[in-house]
Image (cartoon, grey):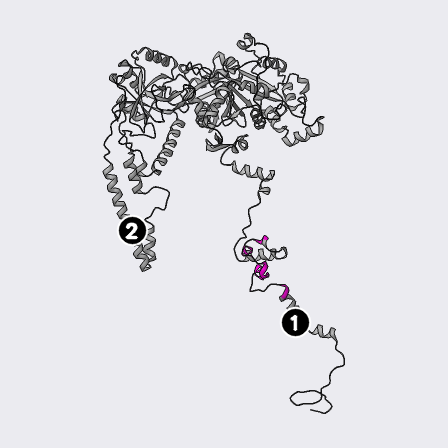
Amino acid sequence: MGTSAKEFDASLGGNEVLPTAANTFKFAASRSVEIAAMTESILRPSKTKLIFQTLPVHMRRRVMSHNSKRLPRRLREGHMEQLKKSGLPPQQKRPSRKYRRRPANLLEEYTRRQRRNVWLETHIWHAKRFHMIEKWGHRLAYRPCDKAFRACYRASSAHCLMQDLSYYTSIQIRGDIEVIRDIFSSITSSACGLGIAAKAYLSGNREGSINIFKPYEYPYGFICSVNFLWTSPTEIWLFVHPAFAKNVESTLSTITNSSSSSNSVDNSKKRKIENKYSGIQIKVITGINRFRLTGPKSHAVLTNALKCVSDIKNIESKEWVAHIINKKHDLALEDKFNFWLSLKSLSSPAQLPPRIIIGLTVKDPRLSRPAKRTKAQLEKIEAINIETLTSIPSFLSSSPLWDEKVREHIKNKKVTNAEYIDHVTKTQIVPGEVNEDDLKLQPIPIVLIQRPGSQECSKKIGYNNGWDIIIPPGYGLPFWLTFVMFGGRSGGLRETESLAFESGEVYMPPDSYSGTLEEKALETKLKDKYFRKPPSKRVNFIKLAQPSPFICPWKILIRDWSGVENDKFFVLRDRRLINELQECIKRKKQIPEVDNMDSCLVAIYIQVVSRGSLQNHANICLPDVNDFKLKCITEPHHEDCNAKVRKEKKIEHRKLLKQLRRQRVKCKKRADNKQITSLKKLKKTSKEPSEYVQSMRELWLPSNVETVQKAGIRETMGYIVHGAFSFTEAKSCGVGYVTLRSLRTLLSNGINQVLVRNVTSRVYRLANFELIKS
């Protein structure tokens, strides 16, 4: 090393010369790589840690690992990326109720929930106040949450009970009247009452009712009872219960399409040959609202809620009114206004001619709605003229409601509540007052149909009378709320069944397809409830001689009385024959021979003479002559042959369970996983009951019932399908069916009373009965 090179080496020694100044910029530039690496390591999290783990200890929460909203905003994006890379989708919190209750989101949710079941226009109102059930493709109100049936009965007998029947299917039939008459002549019978083309109905002033059967199968093949009305000489509307709607549609289409076209080969081409059914058009109308108001005060509710339009000049600017004027149809507003005004003093709808139809054009019901809920009262005016009640004007039943374009105009131009409130707020002079002549709201055509009520018994005459009101689509809820504000009490499906029972009418006939389905569904429900109880709490129906406690075996009963194997049976609906039978019962006379007697059931209404309450599926039995002298008739205990077998099976099953348990314990000790899995498979894994459960149920309730007529000490004539305490009769009553053969045997002994026994009782009770004509 030369002496000129002045370098310092600590190991060799030498002179050390320090610089007099330091260049900071040069120093920082030479260390820029290290500074950048240190800054990145401080600001960015470590690659070995998750983002939420880099937070200070006092800010860390366990929920941060799956809820990104717990993290600071600057870290959320990176956290979401880490979740996606890990393959775990981020689980976000359910949106708040405030967000879900926004109108747009509510509408989307309601649309989704209506894919499986149809909702009525009053569904939201009912869903908040009623127990809802799924039935016949609809979501319907079954019973109110805050009332028993007693309150609803008081409303139907003394006030006003409301029900939404918009689930009924409306079928429109167009064509020549002679062709329509020919179609219904094959599926109806004049023996059941007036036909569809009777003179009383053709004018369109009255609503009718007919029984529909399968083509040319009367008296067998009953489908349902249908209400109808003629809207014009070439158009008729049917209102069908949804349980039978598909059967009615298929029956009508089968008749019209059976011979509507015939194919013949001509030059290798098929051509269509028209026949008399070619001009018939059958269409199912949806969206029509139908409300039922029952009770004497229903007329007061309607007169207070419905304000008729009397002058066409004020409404001729509305679209649907202009459409009617262009068609040169007369609305007869002034005449209908005067007629409705003359009916204000009626104390009950039963005073009007039965089934009368009134077509009105009324103002929007929101205009007449009271400020608070009140009970509607009748106005005290002059006594009504008798001629007004007896004569029905020809213009009374006409209504633009049956025009499809009118219904579309009304629905499209409906003013929402928000728009109406905004309009009233801007235009009203005095706060809280509403101008009834406000033209913002359009007039609405409606149709009223009077219901005469029950005509069966002296105590029941006029009961269940009221009005049916048909309303165009879109206006169901405004009318419903107005009726509620005027004191109407709402009911559901339970009230429909109870009102039919109180009126002494048949609700679901057993010879119809839907009636059979209802019986089977009820049997399944009752059986499940029965077998959920422990054996010590179950009623032993074998000892009580009740071979079929949860369903009425009509076919077996008819076979026992006739001695002939027959899969078909029918309910007697011939009115002339029913009147003859009722006269024979009163006079204790012998019933004459009737065609198809061996497969005939007769509907009867039963009233218990002594104390006691009738139940569903109770036995109607044939009394002996000496039974009227006895104070009490009791069924003796019968021997249960299956009791010993059940006990042996139960002991064997317990032994098997203990054996399987010991095997599982041994396998666990040996850690034999394969054998444990095979033993677990022996356990019940599906919802279906095991073989042991099925065999035990069969021993409790044998399914192979061979005979029911002579199961007890008194021969079984029939069964009660609906038994309960009747408020109109103030005693226990029931609606049931007996075979015509057994009725003939009863009267041949000179007896016009029967014995009834509940399925859970051994006591026979004496009861009076009469035939049901409707």
Q: Earlier in the sequence, mark 1 or mark 2?
A: 1
Left or right, 436 with reference to 279: right
- Picture coordinates of residue 15 (x, y %)? 71, 89
Classed neighbour count for the residue bearing mark 2: other residues with Cα under 10 Å, few (<14), some (14–19), many (≥20): some
Q: Nearer the viewer, residue 325 or 650?
A: 650
Residue at the spot of label 2: 660
Is residue 748 at all visible to an observer of this figure?
A: yes
The amino acid type found where label 1 is placed reads Glu
Image: magenta residue range: 42-69
Classed neighbour count for the residue bearing mark 1: other residues with Cα under 10 Å, few (<14), some (14–19), many (≥20): few
Left or right, 264 with reference to 760: right
Residue 759 position by quadrant: top left
Mark identifier at residue 160: none
When the figure is inspected, residue 492 is found, relative to residue 461, above or below; the finding is below
Residue 484 position by quadrant: top right
Q: Nearer the viewer, residue 249 or 669?
A: 669
Residue at the spot of label 1: 34
Circle 1 or circle 2, nearest the eye: 2
Q: Residue at position x 76%, y 79% from top? A: 21
The amino acid type found where label 2 is placed reads Leu
| Magenta-drawn stretch contains 62 | yes
| Magenta-drawn stretch contains 568 | no
Where disc 2 sits, the SS reads helix
Q: Nearer the viewer, residue 652 or 283?
A: 652
Where disc 1 sits, the SS reads helix
- Picture coordinates of residue 503 (x, y %)? 43, 19
Residue 581 position by quadrant: top left
When the figure is inspected, residue 48 is found, relative to residue 472, above or below; the finding is below
Q: Identify the image quadrant of the N terminus.
A: bottom right
When the figure is inspected, residue 418 is found, relative to residue 281, above or below; the finding is below
The CA distance from mark 1 to mark 2 is 72 Å
